[in-house]
Image (cartoon, rainbow, N blue to C red):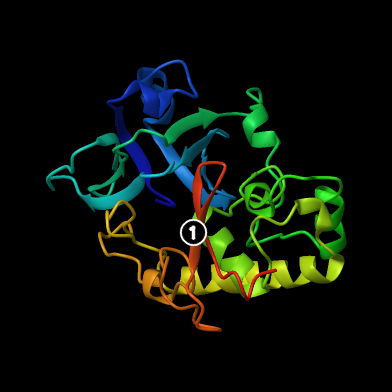
Amino acid sequence: MVGRVMERVCLTHPRTARRNRSPAEVGRRLAGREVVNVGRHGKLLLIGLGDGQTMVAHLGMSGRFSVCAAGADRAPHTHFVAALDDGAEVRFIDPRTFGFVAVRDESEPDPAFSRLGPDAWLEAPEPPALVRALAGRVAPLKALLLDQRIIAGLGNIYADEAMHRAGIHPLRPGGRLSEAEARRLLDATSAVLEQAIDSGGTTLGDLAYLLPDGRAGENFARLKVYGREGEPCLSCGVPVERTAVRARSTYFCPVCQT
C-alpha cells in the first residue's frame, strides 16, 4: 500500500466502522488519500496517510486482510474494500465483526489507543518494569498478559506458548512474578513471536487467519502446548492440560510450569 492512493473505499457493515460515526464517514475520509507508511503497535495496524490522518485497523478474533486484483471474487464477510491506483484491492474479511477499520487525526484522541502498553515485539519492557506493572496484582498471569495496557500485542496462543517456554504456570498471581521469572518470560515472549513471524503466523483449523495472499501460516505445527490437550508435553512427556482463564482456553504443562 505504501506510495499508492486509495482511489475508492467502501465499507459495508456498521460494526466495522464503529470507531467513527458511520461507514460513509470512514470511506469519505480515506478515499483519494495516499498511503505514506504502514506500521503497527500491539494488535493495531497503523496506516499513515498523506494528509496527516491515520487509518487504524484491528483484526479482532476472525478478521484478515486480503490483497487481490480488483476483479477477483469477494469472499463472504468482506466488509471493507480499498481500490488502489495500481489496480489492486485491499479487502478486510471479518466473519464475526469483532475487528474494525477507523480513521483518526491528532484532534481525535481515543482512550483505547492511548492506554496501550509497550509493544511486545518492538519495545518490550525491561524485567523490573514488568514486575512493577504487576506488583500487587492477584489476577492470573495469563489474564494479565492478555491485558493490552500492560504489554500490547500478546494474544491467547502466544501467551500460552511464552508461559510454557518460561516454565511459569498461567494461574500464578501476577504479583508473585520475580524479576528473574520476568526476564525468562520476556525472553520467551520474544522467541515465541520471532518463531511465529518467521512461520507466517498461526492458522487454526477454521482457517480464519490467512496471509494477505491467501496462504495459511505454518506456525501451528510448531506450537508446544496450545491446542494440544491430552497430548504429551514435548519437554517432559506429561499430558498437556487445558483450563479456562477469563473465558479463554488456556493450555499448559502441569509439571514444567510452576
**Left or right: where 218 falls relative to 233:** left
Of residues 230 and 25, which is closer to you in this image? 230
Of residues 106 and 231, which is closer to you in this image? 231
Q: Quadrant of residue 18?
A: top left
Residue that appears at 41% across and 71% down: 219
Q: Quadrant of residue 28?
A: top left
Say if 79 sits above or below 229 in the image. Answer: above
Residue that appears at 63% across and 31% down: 112
In percent of width and height, residue 180 lies at: 83, 71
Circle 1 is placed at which residue position?
Answer: 242
Of residues 123 and 48, which is closer to you in this image? 123
Q: Quick one: quadrant of the C terminus?
A: bottom right
Say if 13 sits above or below 172 in the image. Answer: above
Give, as a three-letter code, the residue at label 1: Arg
In percent of width and height, residue 85 lies at: 29, 44
Mark 1, secondary structure of its residue: strand
